[in-house]
């Protein structure tokens, strides 16, 4: 069994590291708020990430199978329409995913 001093030193080091890891983001946040790069990324990154996710989700869609990619196309269209209508990402993703599951299991399944 390690000595008490060793255990106390280990716990103290862990506490200091944990505190530092939680404090650093707040210390770094203030200078970043006025950064032009962070502002640019905040405007254009969400659309870029969504585009990458759509491409990744549709990369294995085959138009040679009987459904010809129709469930995927309808689900993506529904997601886009709901998002443009309600401006709520969670709602649009849930509607698109739900429609895709329904189409794949009960209509084209």
Image (cartoon, rainbow, N blue to C red):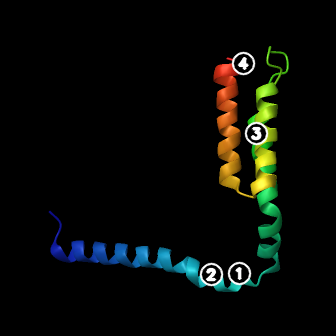
Q: Which mark is first along the chain, 3 or 4? A: 3
Q: Which mark is first along the chain, 1 or 4? A: 1
Element type at mark 2? helix
- Measuring from the top left, give residue 21's x and y in whole percent: 49, 74
Q: Are marks 1 and 3 in contact (CB under 8 Å)?
A: no
Q: Are marks 2 and 3 in contact (CB under 8 Å)?
A: no
Q: Which mark is first along the chain, 3 or 1? A: 1
Q: Which residue is mark 2?
A: 28
Q: Which mark is first along the chain, 3 or 2? A: 2
Q: Which mark is residue 56?
A: 3
- Mark 4 and mark 2: Cα distance apart in space: 51 Å
Q: Are marks 1 and 2 in contact (CB under 8 Å)?
A: yes
Q: Return the residue nearer the eye: 22 or 45.
A: 45
Closer to viewer: mark 4 or mark 3: 4
Q: Is residue 26 left or right of residue 64?
A: left
43 is higher (above) or lower (below) than 108: below
- Measuring from the top left, give residue 94's x and y in whole percent: 65, 44
Q: Badge 2, how many Cα within 10 Å: few under 14, some, many 20+? A: few
Q: Which mark is residue 32?
A: 1
Q: Residue at x 67, y 38 (%)?
A: 97
Task: Look at the image and tell me whether residue 56 can be seen.
Answer: yes
Q: Which residue is mark 4?
A: 108
The quarter of the rendered structure image containing the N terminus is bottom left
Closer to viewer: mark 4 or mark 1: 4
- Mark 1 and mark 3: Cα distance apart in space: 31 Å
27 is higher (above) or lower (below) than 74: below
Q: Badge 3, how many Cα within 10 Å: few under 14, some, many 20+? A: few
Element type at mark 1? helix
């Amino acid at each position: 069994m390690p000595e008490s001093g060793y255990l106390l030193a280990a716990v103290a080091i862990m506490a200091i590291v944990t505190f530092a890891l939680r404090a650093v983001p707040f210390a770094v946040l203030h200078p970043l708020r006025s950064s032009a790069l962070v502002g640019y990324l905040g405007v254009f990154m969400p659309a870029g990430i969504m585009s990458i996710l759509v491409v990744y989700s549709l990369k294995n869609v085959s138009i040679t199978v009987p459904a010809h990619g129709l469930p995927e196309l309808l689900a993506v269209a529904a997601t886009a329409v709901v998002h443009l209508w309600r401006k709520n990402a969670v709602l649009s993703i849930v509607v698109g995913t739900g429609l895709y599951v329904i189409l794949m299991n009960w209509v084209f399944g």
